[in-house]
Image (cartoon, helix red, strand yellow):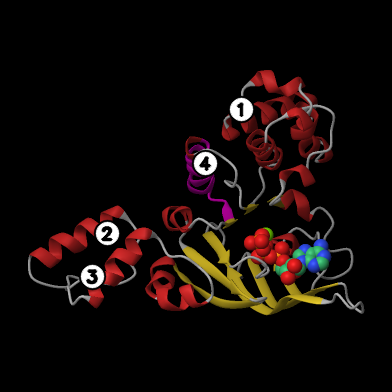
Amino acid sequence: MSQIEVKNLSYKYGVGTPFEVTALDNISFSVEKGEFIGLIGHTGSGKSTLLQCFNGLLKPEGELYIDGVNICEKNNAKGICFKVGLVFQYPEHQLFEDTVYKDIAFGPKNMGLSEGEIKDRVCEALKFSGLSEEILEKSPFELSGGQKRRVAVAGVIAMRPEILVLDEPAAGLDPIGRDSILANLREYHKKEGKTVILSSHNMDDIARNCEKVLVMNSARLEMFETISEVFKRSERLKEIGLDVPMLTSVFEELLKEGYPVNSGIYTVEQAVNEIIAAKDGGKNA
Ligand SMILES: Nc1ncnc2c1ncn2[C@@H]1O[C@H](COP(=O)(O)OP(=O)(O)OP(=O)(O)O)[C@@H](O)[C@H]1O
Ligand SMILES: [Mg+2]
């Protein structure tokens, strides 16, 4: 049994009004425990809508199983937000307490943990997000956009969810902040064996972190493949309004010029190997 199974999932906003929009159209895929999945797609393709279905926030049509339980069925979504932690695209949508401490402690408190355990979890989550303790007594609303995002990430990490779902977690962070959050996510995934699903507009972040990629296009699932397979289809990605990593484009151009290299290259290590192999006389793969 897969940890997540999505079957014929559809979602419409504004049903029955002149503003009705189909945001998800008959989506099906499954995710195994411990996978690191990327989610890409042009603006408005349905990424945030899909991610909000995972913790029961939206009620789609179809089936969405988490560990065998269909959370689209009445009453089955109870407690799912502890198992599936969702970091929203706009972090101000999930900060509401009067201090940062209370905000990060909110999830663990609702899980019924002791005061001591809650404190430990808050400290651990602060470190994860790269925040210092002085921030704990501040109001979340006096923080910068980047700090708000880190607090939102910390609040979800503090619940130690089995499945971590992040909607553009690095948007608005400076490059150092972005790299440190992504590195901590990789560690959470590797050390703890947790499943991570991450949406991003930054193809290099997707290339560096994810094993498989979901590609959304106008409410539909266009591809669900390994990262290398997805970036091999760079022409199609461009047609549906997406970029490819810089390295992928460089190797596509070399291939077009007749150089003996492979497509679907997205890391520096792969690029170096390709160049060495090409120098030695041809495609190595
Ligand atoms: N609350 C809402 N009410 C009505 N329509 C909505 C709402 N949220 C999203 N939509 C519409 O649903 C579709 C999918 O939106 P969604 O936010 O899921 O896309 P996205 O891929 O996350 O976009 P982005 O890359 O800009 O974050 C879009 O047409 C959007 O306008
Ligand atoms: Mg979105």
Q: Is residue 204 left or right of residue 121?
A: left
Across and down, in percent, residue 148 comes to: 69, 36
The quarter of the picture where the C terminus appears is bottom left
| Mark 1 in CB contact with mark 3 (< 8 angstroms) | no
Viewer-nearest of labels 3 and 4? 3
The residue tagged 4 is 178
Which SS class for mark 3?
helix
| Mark 4 in CB contact with mark 2 (< 8 angstroms) | no
In the rendered view, tell whether residue 24 sits above or below residue 197: below
Q: Which residues are magenta?
A: 177-196
Q: Is residue 264 left or right of residue 192?
A: left
| Circle nearer the N terminus (1, 3) | 1
Label 4 and label 1: CA atoms lie apart by: 13 Å
- Label 3 CA crowd tier, 10 Å (few <14, some 14–19, many 20+): some
> What's the residue at 12%, 72% (across, down)?
282
| Mark 2 in CB contact with mark 1 (< 8 angstroms) | no
Instruction: Report the disc number at residue 48.
Output: none
The residue tagged 3 is 254
**Amino acid identity at mark 4:** Arg
Across and down, in percent, residue 175 comes to: 48, 39
| Circle nearer the N terminus (4, 2) | 4
| Mark 4 in CB contact with mark 1 (< 8 angstroms) | no
The quarter of the picture where the N terminus appears is bottom right
Label 1 and label 3: CA atoms lie apart by: 43 Å
Label 2 and label 1: CA atoms lie apart by: 34 Å
The residue tagged 2 is 270
Front in this rendered view, residue 48 or 1: 48
